[in-house]
Image (cartoon, rainbow, N blue to C red):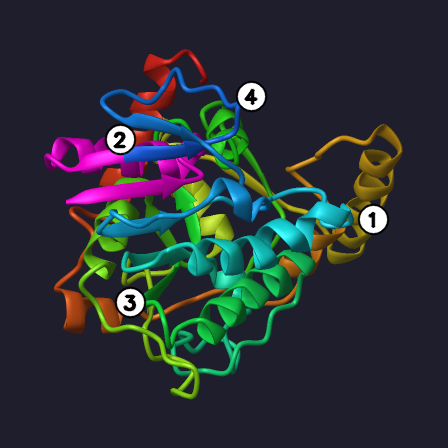
């Protein structure tokens, strides 16, 4: 298979490229001229930008995996452009190539009603600017689905080797302490399991302009969805701690901290990933649980092992790299 990957230098993109190369596929990474390509082995490179249609054009590829996205700075003018218009640009450039768009559970919103796993057929209801931008990207793809075969994958929290977002939790838990932003429950997926679903999605059903909301969309995740305090304790066990003290941030403190962190990031023109108004809004919205049953049923996809085993593998990877 001849595949092109956007966002190849990101956390998920690096793992996807590795899996594709291991499977014997001919892989090209779409990168910007300034991108760090050091972690990508066995792939060809093509310089381009999803915000510049003149650098795109994917005739000759069998599949395009679109992962490029802007994660931080939701106030930035490029945020919606990259996450929504970027999808439209990629879809328009696909020609005869199949397109798999990696979106986010944030596009769907939290579990509704509270505690019931969200399915692909539920109407999306994002609660953050990030979620709204990813949903806009999905809608842009849907508008072009009459001319391009498109499938969407929505991962929840993604963790695994090389991830920086979950690293603070592992660092603190390894020392017997965890500060959690919410007591809500959430779905997770290990990055290696996610890339297997992304690859499988290339043979899954496709979306259509007037189809039901869930057609051509797949959620990823383990069957279990622990609460954040439970997850923190299990991360501690994965790090070799028999007991982890878990402290929950009060809701008012989280909301105020998110607003203050965002003002500071705007003033510094920096990207503060750990806390922002967006992240506080998502943490305060309740449970984030998805049902992966559709991926099980249609694609035969399941995580390769248990959540606890994946947490242990991740802890070992952080330890080997000197991160914890």
In the rendered structure, which segment of residues is drawn in magenta? Answer: 1-27
Of 263 and 233, the residue lying toward us: 263
Q: Position of residue 230 (x, y in %)?
A: 43, 50
User: Which numbered disc, 1 or 3, marks the residue that appears first in the sequence?
Assistant: 1
Q: Residues within 10 Å of mark 1 (few under 14, many from 20)?
A: some
Residue marked by disc 4: 34
- Of marks 3 and 4, the one in the foreground: 4
Of 44 and 181, the residue lying toward us: 44
Q: What residue is drawn where x is 45% and y is 39%?
A: 7
Residue marked by disc 2: 313
User: Which numbered disc, 3 or 2, marks the residue that appears first in the sequence?
Assistant: 3
Dot 2: what SS?
helix
User: Which numbered disc, 1 or 2, marks the residue that appears first in the sequence?
Assistant: 1
Question: Would residue 312 be visible to someone looking at this image?
Answer: no
Task: Establish if 190 lies above or below 47.
Answer: below
Does the magenta segment cover residue 182? no
Dot 3: what SS?
loop
CA distance for labels 1 and 2: 35 Å
Q: Residues within 10 Å of mark 2 (few under 14, many from 20)?
A: some
CA distance for labels 2 and 4: 32 Å
User: Which numbered disc, 2 or 4, marks the residue that appears first in the sequence?
Assistant: 4
**Dots 3 and 4: beta carbons under 8 Å?**
no
Residue 259: mark: 1
Residue 292: mark: 3
Task: Establish if 175 lies above or below 191.
Answer: above
Q: What residue is drawn where x is 18% and y is 35%?
A: 26
User: Which quadrant does the C terminus fall into?
Assistant: top left
């Amino acid at each position: 298979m001849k595949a092109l990957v956007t966002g190849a230098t990101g956390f998920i993109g690096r793992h996807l490229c590795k899996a594709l190369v291991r499977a014997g596929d001919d892989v090209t990474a779409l990168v910007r001229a300034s991108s760090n390509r050091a972690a990508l082995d066995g792939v060809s490179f093509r310089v381009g930008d999803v915000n510049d249609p003149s650098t795109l054009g994917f005739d000759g590829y069998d599949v395009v995996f679109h992962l490029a996205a802007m994660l931080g700075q939701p106030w930035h003018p490029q945020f919606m452009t990259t996450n929504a218009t970027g999808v439209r640009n990629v879809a328009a450039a696909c020609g005869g190539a199949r397109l798999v768009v990696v979106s986010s559970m944030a596009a769907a919103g939290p579990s509704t009603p509270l505690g019931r796993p969200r399915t692909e057929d539920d109407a999306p209801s994002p609660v953050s600017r990030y979620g709204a931008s990813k949903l806009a990207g999905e809608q842009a793809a849907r508008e072009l689905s009459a001319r391009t075969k498109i499938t969407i994958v929505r991962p929840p929290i993604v963790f695994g080797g090389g991830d920086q977002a979950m690293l603070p939790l592992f660092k603190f838990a390894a020392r017997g302490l965890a500060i959690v932003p919410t007591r809500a429950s959430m779905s997770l997926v290990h990055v290696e399991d996610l890339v297997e679903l992304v690859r499988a999605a290339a043979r899954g059903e496709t979306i259509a302009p007037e189809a039901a909301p869930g057609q051509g969309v797949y959620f990823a995740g383990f069957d279990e969805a622990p609460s954040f305090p439970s997850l923190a304790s299990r991360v501690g066990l994965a790090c070799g701690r028999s007991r982890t003290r878990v402290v929950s941030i009060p809701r008012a403190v989280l909301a105020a901290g998110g607003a203050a962190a965002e003002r500071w990031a705007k003033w510094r023109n920096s990207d503060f990933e750990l806390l922002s108004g967006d992240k506080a809004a998502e943490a305060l919205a309740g449970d984030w649980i998805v049902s992966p049953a559709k991926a099980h049923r249609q694609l035969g996809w399941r995580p390769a092992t248990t959540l606890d085993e994946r947490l242990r593998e991740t802890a070992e990877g952080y330890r080997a790299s000197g991160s914890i």
